[in-house]
Image: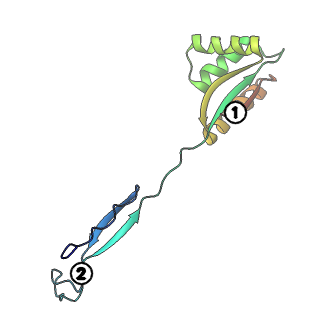
Amino acid sequence: MRGSASLPAAPRPGTERTPVVAASDPRAPGGDDRSNTAIITRTKPRTKRPSLYRVLLLNDDYTPMEFVVHVVERFFNKSHEDAYQIMMHVHHNGVGECGVFTYEVAETKVTQVMDFARKHQHPLQCVMEKK
């Protein structure tokens, strides 16, 4: 078509077009009319959600139920009723989930629980698994 300018393609998702005035643009201070406006496309980095991990308590025949309730309340910020329900689930099913966290948080909680159990001479096992 005569006299029509082609339109630039629409930017891809995650990009934006920012007009930049060249130094030789007449609109720039001290510029001349030898250059046009340039377009720079900036790509926004896409972030990925971190993987989540389940923190689990394993049943054993030696750790007192009251101690397990105390651990769940202390390290997982559960109410006494919720901690009791988790402890009973562990007792009846052999394993129970205390929470879901990012890798670093889950790893820290497992270490804290295991250290606390050893300090009090209980064989309680706490593990994490990818959700």
Q: CA distance from mark 2 to mark 1?
A: 61 Å
Foreground residue, 16 or 68? 16
- Disc assigned to residue 90: none
Quick one: SS at disc 1? helix
Foreground residue, 24 or 91? 24
Q: Name the residue at 58% across, 10% down.
A: 81
Residue 42 lies, in percent from the top left, at 39, 65
Mark 2 is surrounded, within 10 Å at the Cα level, by few (under 14), some (14 to 19) or many (20 or more) other residues, namely few
Q: Name the residue at 15% across, 80% down.
A: 27
Of mark 2 and mark 1, the one earlier in the sequence is 2
Residue 18 lies, in percent from the top left, at 30, 66
Quick one: SS at disc 2? loop
Please report contact status of discs 2 and 1: CB closer than 8 Å, yes or no. no
Q: Residue furthest right?
A: 61
Residue topped by disc 2: 36
Residue topped by disc 1: 110
Left or right: where does residue 46 sit relative to residue 94? left
Vertical order, 73 against 118 (above or below):
above
Left or right: where does residue 81 sit relative to residue 129? left
Foreground residue, 128 or 112? 128
Q: Mark 1 is on which residue type?
A: Val
Foreground residue, 90 or 30? 30
Q: Name the residue at 33% across, 61% down.
A: 10
**Which is closer to the viewer, label 2 or label 1?**
2
Mark 1 is surrounded, within 10 Å at the Cα level, by few (under 14), some (14 to 19) or many (20 or more) other residues, namely some
Left or right: where does residue 32 sit relative to residue 88? left
Residue 77 lies, in percent from the top left, at 56, 23
- Please tell me in which quadrant of the rendered image residue 28 appears: bottom left
Vertical order, 51 against 30 (above or below):
above
Q: Name the residue at 82% across, 18% down.
A: 60
Q: Quadrant of the N terminus?
A: bottom left
Q: Mark 2 is on which residue type?
A: Asn
